[in-house]
């Protein structure tokens, strides 16, 4: 992916200098002088001459200016200054320049698709991390990953941990994490994170489970200090195991953090280096970021060059927000697309409802089982398990474990009282679609 075009960089500084000059002479001398001076110093820093920069603006404007000339010629109004003025005011010069800059930088969302779809060669989902300061847009990226996962794997399991959940609610309202149910999909307590990571790690060794799983962790930098050094090391090892072994099973995690302190978080440098990264604009300018990404010396120089380019770019280019990606060991200047189109609230099949789907399917295939339980012919869960063993063998399923590590047994335990009381199947509640638009 190309990352820069020197001619367009010159044009950017030249256009900025011309804009400052126009403002200085036509509107506000002080503001115009500040803009022009800033453009001049940028030219000096990038090694561009003033005349070169100003002249390099013309190739970008040639096409729209030619359109004006063609209109004037067609109308026979070559001498009309009024028409020239009106057409120039209507001509989207800045938009044209923006599109040219976007084309030069090759900004698109292909890199984002790599993070949310299986690798076509390995058929693995990637686990990755997002590094961003407050306001950089970390939550928008995480929301996109969640949205994409639910859309592609409607029967998959989604777990979201946000230790700053109260603050998230204040910012997003009912759209906080798409309005997904707390305690089933959304969690905020540190001990819940331990349980989630442990359960997902155990899934790797459970051949009876083939459900895709997504774990999203926001404010990772505020979560990990809540644990002891021993806990951090255990969690780091489990996350590493999920990253290495889970991709083939369509199990992935997405972590967002403001800072990454390898030693402070108990994460091995080799693990950090193995992750794919998205470094957002403000976070890229924090000193020593490349050290925590585990970059080699040659990559550090390349990373610093990308940061210099990022600083010189507008914060938004045709609805793309420039950032730096480190995917598949390749550094690149990229852009986060506009993600505000996503719905504020989503419906989802919760993990417990998915297990219920298995139990409901079982009762639909074997209706006599439900009758025998309610008739007290099968008086206990233990007896029910014994009855199920030969049935599961015929169905080609794994033997039923009598503990909560097996989601089938956990659902039987959770639903047993309702089944005995003839309150089966349970009513399924759907979340109503929301209308509020979250703040950016």
Image (cartoon, rainbow, N blue to C red):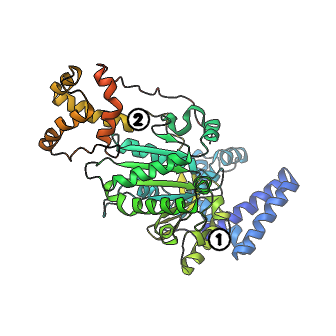
Q: Is residue 402 above or below residue 335?
A: above
| Pointer 1 or 2: first along the chain | 1
Give the Cα separation between the discs numbered 1 and 2.
40 Å
Q: Is residue 108 above or below residue 152?
A: below
Look at mark 1 in the image and give the residue it sits on: 288
Q: Is residue 354 left or right of residue 161?
A: left
Residue at 55% across, 69% down:
293
Q: Secondary structure at mark 1?
A: loop
Q: Position of residue 281 (x, y in %)?
A: 63, 59
Mark 1 touches mark 2? (CB < 8 Å): no
Q: Considering the image in quadrants, where does the C terminus appear?
A: top right
Residue at 87% across, 55% down:
29
Q: Quadrant of residue 373?
A: top left
Q: Nearer the viewer, residue 108 or 307?
A: 307
Q: Quadrant of residue 63?
A: bottom right
Q: Which mark is residue 348?
A: 2
Q: Nearer the viewer, residue 254 or 242?
A: 242
């Amino acid at each position: 992916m190309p990352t820069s075009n020197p001619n367009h960089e010159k044009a950017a500084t030249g256009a900025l200098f011309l804009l400052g000059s126009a403002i200085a002479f036509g509107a506000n001398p002080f503001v115009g002088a500040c803009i022009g001076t800033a453009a001049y110093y940028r030219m000096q820093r990038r090694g561009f001459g003033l005349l070169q920069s100003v002249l390099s603006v013309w190739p970008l404007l040639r096409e729209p200016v030619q359109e004006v000339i063609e209109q004037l010629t067609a109308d026979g109004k070559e001498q009309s200054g009024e028409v020239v003025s009106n057409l120039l005011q209507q001509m989207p010069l800045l938009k044209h320049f923006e599109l040219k800059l976007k084309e030069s930088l090759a900004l698109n969302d292909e890199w984002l698709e790599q993070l949310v779809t299986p690798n076509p060669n390995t058929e693995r989902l990637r686990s990755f991390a997002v590094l961003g300061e407050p306001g950089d847009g970390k939550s928008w990226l995480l929301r996109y990953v969640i949205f994409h996962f639910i859309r592609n794997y409607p029967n998959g399991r989604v777990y979201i941990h946000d230790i700053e959940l109260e603050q998230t609610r204040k910012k997003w309202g009912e759209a906080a994490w798409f309005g997904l149910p707390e305690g089933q999909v959304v969690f905020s307590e540190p001990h819940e994170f331990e349980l989630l990571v442990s359960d997902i790690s155990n899934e790797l060794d459970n051949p009876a489970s083939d459900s895709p799983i997504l774990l999203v962790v926001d404010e990772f930098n505020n979560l990990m200090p809540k644990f002891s050094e021993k806990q951090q090391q255990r969690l780091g090892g489990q996350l590493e195991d999920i990253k290495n072994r889970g991709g083939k099973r369509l199990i992935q995690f997405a972590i967002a953090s403001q800072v990454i302190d390898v030693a402070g978080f108990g994460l091995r440098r080799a693990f950090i280096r193995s992750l794919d990264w998205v470094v957002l604009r403000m976070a890229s300018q924090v000193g020593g970021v490349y050290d925590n990404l585990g970059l080699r010396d040659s990559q550090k120089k390349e990373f610093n060059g990308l940061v210099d380019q990022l600083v010189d770019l507008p914060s938004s280019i045709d609805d793309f927000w420039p950032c730096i990606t480190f995917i598949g060991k390749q550094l690149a200047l990229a852009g986060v697309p506009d993600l505000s189109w996503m719905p504020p609230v989503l419906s989802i099949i919760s993990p417990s409802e998915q297990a219920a789907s298995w139990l409901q399917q079982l009762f639909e295939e074997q209706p006599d089982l439900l009758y025998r339980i309610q008739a007290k012919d099968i008086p206990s869960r233990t007896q029910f398990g014994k009855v199920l063993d030969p049935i599961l063998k015929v169905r080609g399923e794994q033997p039923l474990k009598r503990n909560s590590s097996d989601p089938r047994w956990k659902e039987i335990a959770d639903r047993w009282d309702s089944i005995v009381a003839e309150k089966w199947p349970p009513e399924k509640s759907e979340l109503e679609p929301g209308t509020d638009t979250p703040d950016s």
